[in-house]
Amino acid sequence: MDVMADDPKRDSVLETVDAMRRAMVMALVDVCSIPAVCPQSGGDGELRKLEWLQEHIRNFGFDELVRYDAVDEDKPSIVRPNLVAVRRGEHRDGPTLWFVTHVDVVPEGDRSLWESDPWKPVVREDKVVGRGVEDNGTPLIASIYAVKALSDVGVRQGLNVGCALVADEEMGSKYGIQHLIERGVFRKGDLIVVPDAGLPKGDSIEIAEKSILWLKFKVEGKQGHASMPHTAKNALEAGVELAYRVNKELKSTMTERDELFDPPYSTFELTMKVANVANINTIPGEDIFFMDCRVLPERSTDEVLDTVRKVMKQVGDRYGTTIHLSLAQNERAAPRTDPESRVVQLLSEQVRQVLNVEPRVYGIGGGTCAAYFRRKGFDAAVWAKIDEVAHSANEYTWIQNIVDMAKVFALMMLRA
Ligand SMILES: [Zn+2]
């Protein structure tokens, strides 16, 4: 593509985004003052917030606005809404460049830690503070205003551009992204951007994720009086040894490194411990604890489980206890997105231009909804310019980040 030829377009798109700064801040404040907590976390869902957005973007230059609502199986009275907004490109039959953002937010958490009302976002100097302003408000606003910028300037971009505003990201995506994938909204060859994780400089593009394995161990012994251990089977003692040995065995055998990832190795961490007996002189008959494992894609989670079961057997035999293992989560790593893929290259180029940083690709231990796309064979890039204060008290976003992300998205649309 001749870069010189469309520089005037580029400049006016960037100027238009700059001029939208105030409007984007106001929209972010307005939209985040509508709570959208899912019913599973005690909220009443995303409908009101999504309807506000649907009305707001009516004249943003989208050619199609289609709703794909799901019904919440736990609470059938609650609709879990999704909005798919598409601006057609010159190549209507070609692929679509998607920006997938989520409308739902997590609850406020401990209210006493907030310095302002989480549901009444405020502008404080160069920031907006409130629940959902970073996760996922800033990327959401940036993506829809990027389309508006193109429309206001009057350019018709090459590829179709889609903004998918989805429900249910925080609790599993069943009524959100997974629902849209099942309904066939995304077509083979589409380019997917999921702006839901990132770093403050905006120089990191996530293309891979580790497998996630959450293990629950339950050791069953026999409760008894602490002065009469021969009449009991101490589940805690067996549990302590089990935890120690499983931890040590995994950390010493699963040692490969992959420098794409941060950190560049598999992690195995003992985490939650369930309380047992309420008094000092009782031998506990049950011991329950958990382990969080993030495994490099090079190693299968079956290997982890084989190691764990081997140690369980040894400890169980030694103490005469029964040990149960259950999997609270078992997510195989999705195939990574090719760093040379069109979406990653397109994104890298605009990050370079707008932010003047050299982007790098990397992998993380956390799971994002990009995995659903990658498993279906889509190239998906996860990127945002954020401080990663999602889910915390006093969640905030830099106003400059809203502008920067809108610029990156608008140029991606223009160049695609
Ligand atoms: Zn999020």
Image (tube, rainbow, N blue to C red):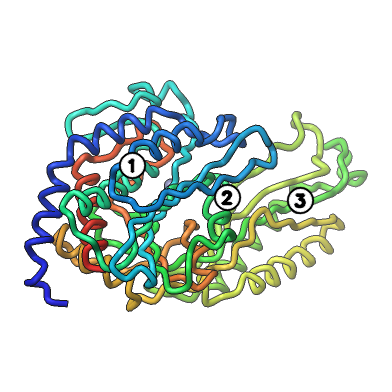
Depth-wise, is mark 3 or mark 1 nearer the camera?
1
Gap in angstroms between the C-alphas marked 3 and 2: 26 Å
Judged from the image, the secondary structure of the residue bearing numbered disc 2 is loop
**Taking 338 as reference, is 287 left or right?**
right
Quadrant containing the C terminus in the rendered view: bottom left
Q: Residue at x 80, y 40 (%)?
A: 284
**Taking 360 as reference, is 99 left or right?**
right
The kind of residue tagged 3 is Lys
Q: Position of residue 131 (x, y in %)?
A: 39, 33
Q: Residue furthest right?
A: 231
On the question of residue 325 being in view, the answer is yes
Sequence-first disc among 1 and 2: 1
Gap in angstroms between the C-alphas marked 3 and 1: 52 Å
Q: Position of residue 1 (x, y in %)?
A: 17, 77
The residue identified by callout 3 is 218
The residue identified by callout 1 is 57
Judged from the image, the secondary structure of the residue bearing numbered disc 1 is loop
The kind of residue tagged 1 is Ile
Q: Is residue 340 above or below residue 75?
A: below
Depth-wise, is mark 1 or mark 2 nearer the camera?
1
Q: Are marks 3 and 1 in contact (CB under 8 Å)?
A: no
The residue identified by callout 2 is 172
